[in-house]
Image: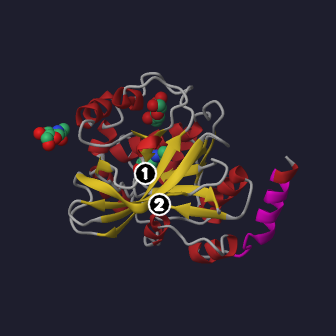
Amino acid sequence: MNHLLSVLALIILITPTHASTPQVYWHAMLPNAPMPRAILDLISFDELDKDKFNVDLRYEVDALRYNGQLYVEDQVHDAPNATLFFFEKDLNPGSKFDLQFTKMTSGSPLISRSQANTIPFSSNKLLEILTHFQVKPMSITAYAMNKTLVECEMPALDGESKLCATSLESMVEFSMMNLGTRDLQASSTMVKKKSGDVKVKKTYSVAPDGVRVLDKDELVVVCHSEQYPYTVFYCHTTGKGKSKAYTIALEGNDGTKVEAIAVCHLDTSKWNPKHLAFQILKVKRGRVPICHFMPEDNVTWTIKK
Ligand SMILES: *[C@@H]1O[C@H](CO)[C@@H](O)[C@H](O)[C@H]1NC(C)=O
Ligand SMILES: *[C@@H]1O[C@H](CO)[C@@H](O)[C@H](O)[C@H]1NC(C)=O
Ligand SMILES: *[C@@H]1O[C@H](CO)[C@@H](O)[C@H](O)[C@H]1NC(C)=O
């Protein structure tokens, strides 16, 4: 606990007090960590653009449908071709994976913490929030926003710690508190050389010397952005000794090069026994590490080695 308090004290000490750009904030908090692609992409949306958010959501109708059983069935059906889950022992130079990288950019801007603090963020304030963003109550946009709020309010799973961060500042602090240090790195899957469409499924091989462990102490925080008019990061961690992050150099059969992040779960004994991973890999829950690649918009936080 003392350690946590000292990390907190350090965070408070160095947090820039004046309103600053995300770049200035990042540089002050994480001087030795490059900003990952997933966050750089978000910074390019520099103001709240309600119309853009609404337009993007229209294309997300299908994505919403995917939250039901249908998605699971589609995935199982696709499973023989797409490597959704794999065993850690199969992660070696030369290993082949059929992958399709998807990017669900929300098209929403990052706002500062002081701005975020002026807008309620709670499902029982939904009407007020909808009014603030001029969103019609019965629209698909309203549905998506409610879904995000409800998900954010669900308690963390046993042994998990989670936060819906409504600003870059709260995401960085959550990661520092949970990793117990300021010396962090943030990584996201990055397409390095585009030869074909990364959204098309293709066979990737792991490059020679292409596998590198990212984290120390088997401790990882993962954040991904949610559907919302401004960027909301859903961040969670399962604590020490529970997961491991890798960066993997992949080469597609068409020359596409991807620096992919994969996370391996070392203990799945508390997962739902019907989890898709068990259906695909034909194992029961337990201590066989099960891994998956991260999409381009997830941010993986680890302690700098
Ligand atoms: C999987 O691959 C096989 C052979 O390449 C192909 O015939 C089949 O349509 C593919 N299935 C899916 C769901 O993509
Ligand atoms: C928000 O979602 C929850 C959970 O699905 C639902 O019970 C609730 O009625 C929704 N609220 C509105 C205003 O749609
Ligand atoms: C990665 O991001 C997607 C949304 O793009 C999300 O559905 C998924 O749960 C995230 N993965 C992890 C491990 O957080």
Compared to residue 207, the image places residue 47 above or below, namely below
SS assignment at label 1: loop
Q: Residue 188 carries which label?
A: 2
Compared to residue 222, the image places residue 197 above or below, namely below
* Highlighted range, magenta: 4-18
Depth check, front residue: 117 or 158: 158
- Ligand 1 is in which quadrant of the figure? top left
Residue designated by label 1: 294
Name the kind of residue labelled 2 in the image: Ser
Q: In which quarter of the image is residue 64?
A: top left
Q: Which residue is drawn at 36% across and 35% down?
A: 67
Q: Is residue 152 left or right of residue 58?
A: right
Name the kind of residue labelled 1 in the image: Met
| Classed neighbour count for the residue bearing mark 1: other residues with Cα under 10 Å, few (<14), some (14–19), many (≥20) | many
Q: Is residue 213 left or right of residue 184?
A: left
Tag 1–tag 2 contact (CB < 8 Å):
yes
Q: Is residue 275 magenta?
A: no
SS assignment at label 2: loop
Instruction: Give the farthest residue toward the right.
Output: 2
